[in-house]
Amino acid sequence: MNFGFFFSSFFLSIIMVFMGAISLIVQRFHFLMSLISLEFMVLGLFLLLFSVVSFGYEGYLCFIVLSFASCEAALGLGLLVSLVRSHGSDFISIVSLYEC
C-alpha cells in the first residue's frame, strides 16, 4: 500500500474543498461563479472519497457520487440559462423574491 499517495491526495482534496468554499464566499454575487465554486468543491469531495475508498473494494461508490455531481451541474446550468434569459444577467441583486 502506498500511503504517500493517500496522504497527498487526501490533503489535496481537503485544500480543494476549502478553496472552493472561500471562492464561493468571495464570488457570491454571480450565479455562474457560485456554480463553478460548488463544482470545484464536489470535485474535491470526489477526490477525497476516491482516496479513502481506493484501499478497499468499494470503488463503485465513487462513480455514483460522480454521476450525481454531473446531474447537479446540468441542473444548475439549466437554471442559470433560464435566469439569464428571463432577467438578462446573472447578478443575484437582479433577482427579487417578491416578483411573480
Image (cartoon, rainbow, N blue to C red):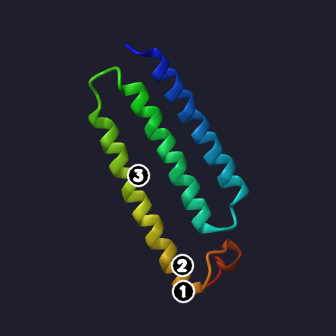
Classify the position of the N terminus by image quarter.
top left
Q: Is residue 44 above or below residue 2?
A: below
Whole-percent x and y of residue 61? 31, 36
Q: Which badge, 3 or 2, is on the more N-terminal residue?
A: 3
Residue at disc 3, secondary structure: helix
Whole-percent x and y of residue 88? 60, 86
* Tag 2 residue: 83
Classify the position of the C terminus by image quarter.
bottom right
Q: CA distance from mark 1 to mark 2?
A: 5 Å
Q: Which badge, 1 or 3, is on the more N-terminal residue?
A: 3
Q: Is residue 58 above or below residue 69?
A: above
Q: Is residue 100 visible?
A: no
Which numbered marker is on residue 29? none
Q: Are marks 1 and 2 in contact (CB under 8 Å)?
A: yes
What's the residue at 65%, 80% (across, down)?
Answer: 98
Image-based side of 33 in relation to 8, left or right: right
Q: Amino acid at mark 3?
A: Ala
Q: How many marks?
A: 3
Image-based side of 100 in relation to 92, left or right: left
Which numbered marker is on residue 86? 1
* Residue 33 quadrant: bottom right
* Tag 3 residue: 69
Image-based side of 76 in relation to 62, left or right: right
What's the residue at 54%, 86% (across, down)?
Answer: 86
Q: Is residue 51 above or below residue 42?
A: above
Q: Are marks 1 and 3 in contact (CB under 8 Å)?
A: no
Q: Amino acid at mark 2?
A: Leu
Q: Is residue 81 above or below residue 66?
A: below
Q: Amino acid at mark 1?
A: Ser
